[in-house]
Image (cartoon, helix red, strand yellow):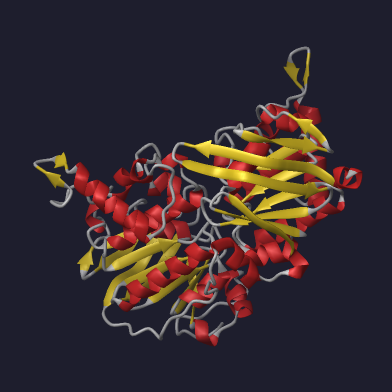
Amino acid sequence: MKLMDTQNIIEMLHITKEFPGIIANDDITLQLRRGEIHALLGENGAGKSTLMSVLFGLYQPEAGEIKKNGEVVKIHDPNDATALGIGMVHQHFKLIDVFTVLDNIILGAETTKMGFLQKKEARKKVEALSEKYGLKVDLDAKVEDITVGMQQRVEILKMLYRDNEILIFDEPTAVLTPQEIDELMATMKEFAKEGKSILFISHKLNEIMAVADRVTVLRKGKCIGTVETKETDKQSLSNMMVGRPVQLEVVKTPAKPTDVVLEVEGLTVPSKGHKRNAVNDVSFTVRAGEIVCIAGIDGNGQSELVYGLTGLEKCSGGKVTLCGHDISHASIRRRGGNMSHIPEDRHKHGLVLDFTLEQNMVLQRFREPSFQHLHFIKQGAVREYAEKLIEQYDVRSGQGPITVARSMSGGNQQKAIIAREVDREKPLIVAVQPTRGLDVGAIEYIHSQLVAERDKGRAVLLVSLELDEVMSLSDRILVMYEGEIVGELDPKATTVQELGLYMAGAKRMTKEGDPA
């Protein structure tokens, strides 16, 4: 027994955590060994983030105890966790946008002398850590001006600055590009080599198989088991996670495209932070009955292209035609008459976080006669509609339709948005990163829904950073690089390597469609 105590740096024993209407963690035991990368796997709402929030002191459990190096510890808040050497990178970063990178890193752990900040020493320490782990970031840039990948580096540097030895990563790759994911995996392995212990929440089986030593699987708040990664495979893990066999490949018949639904001609969208345009003279079409995917490394104009199409940003040139109507200068509401939009940022553009789930489900539809009479909302109709979508899309929440959206897990927030947008049955679906933060069971369902919508004759414009998703779901691939379409590829006739060359700007097609 003594051996186990020294081998396990952290033991979470019989942890139970309840919220109104739900037991998020039901008698869970988790043991983290010194110097290992331990993955925590489970469906959306399985209780993974809750369990890690208990370890980090954000929640107090109803039952159970936590041991560090074999001794019981009390973690009342994140300051206690930090004092014990526990750090956490949250799924939604905890940074102050208007502060600089350096200020964010040292916030709460400032070195002072006679009441004055000693930033010079702090800067030296951060620069040394940044150099050592390859986490290059501009310390004087404001957080609001850097990419999400850079923001994550800031969060990691925050942990390292505090000399944490137990590092918790909650869905760390959900917002990263493939290249940034590779860099993060290498960094995590480097941490483990140095003797740091890592808890790594993820839905992505490829990443878990590549980087984790062991995996603990949670399902509906209960611990299903812990397995050695080298003794299992992706299919077995997905079965443990969902409780049934999961189709890991997209099943679809060849597309039968018909009329043009969306036509984009010479679209130009100015950039906020740089002199050159974010989207420069882009033209393409999307037809009914096909899924067209915009692929590219994050930050190459995909977001601004979608903002221009949906009306979130003003275009400085070009024309957008939807269902035969010029919508280049139309309002967002008018565009929404023929367009469903699954946005990139579910918190900023997808949900009103302090509204209930049922209110969010009818955000664009509450004016319809089904949901209002003489300007009064029909509460019964709204609830019935929300309950139908919650059941159909398996949206898990503690109090069903009256759950406040903010209190739901990120994956279930995403499922709610997808349910709402797909059910609107518009001729065009613009889906940006639709499976970000979703588990394999939910991804399987969302992919099948998008294919079903395509087969019903809808046009689907997909924007994705997931290369597997790009290759398996799309009927045509358009690659964006530095604000321009540099290639149009057939997923059946190309490879991930070739796609990567276009994404990196090493290859591009001429106006005639030939490789340059």
In the rendered view, tell whether residue 398 sits above or below residue 36.
above
Front in this rendered view, residue 232 or 449: 232
In the rendered image, which quarter is residue 122 located in? top right
Q: Which residue is pictured at 64% across the width and 70% down the height?
A: 236
Observer-nearest of 483 and 171: 171
Report whether 298 appears left or right of 350. right
Residue 282 image position (x, y, % from top left): 41, 68
User: Horizontally, is 306 left or right of 14 in the view?
Assistant: left
Q: Position of residue 111 (x, y in %)?
A: 77, 23
Please state the horizontal and vertical placement of residue 87, each as a whole percent of the image: 71, 39
| Residue 125, placed above or below residue 213 | above
Residue 206 visible within the image: yes
Position of 485 with respect to 366 (left or right) is: right
| Residue at the farthest top position | 114
At 29% from the left edge and 61% from the top edge, which residue is drawn? Answer: 423
Q: How many marks?
A: 0
In the image, residue 58 lies at what x, y percent? Answer: 61, 33
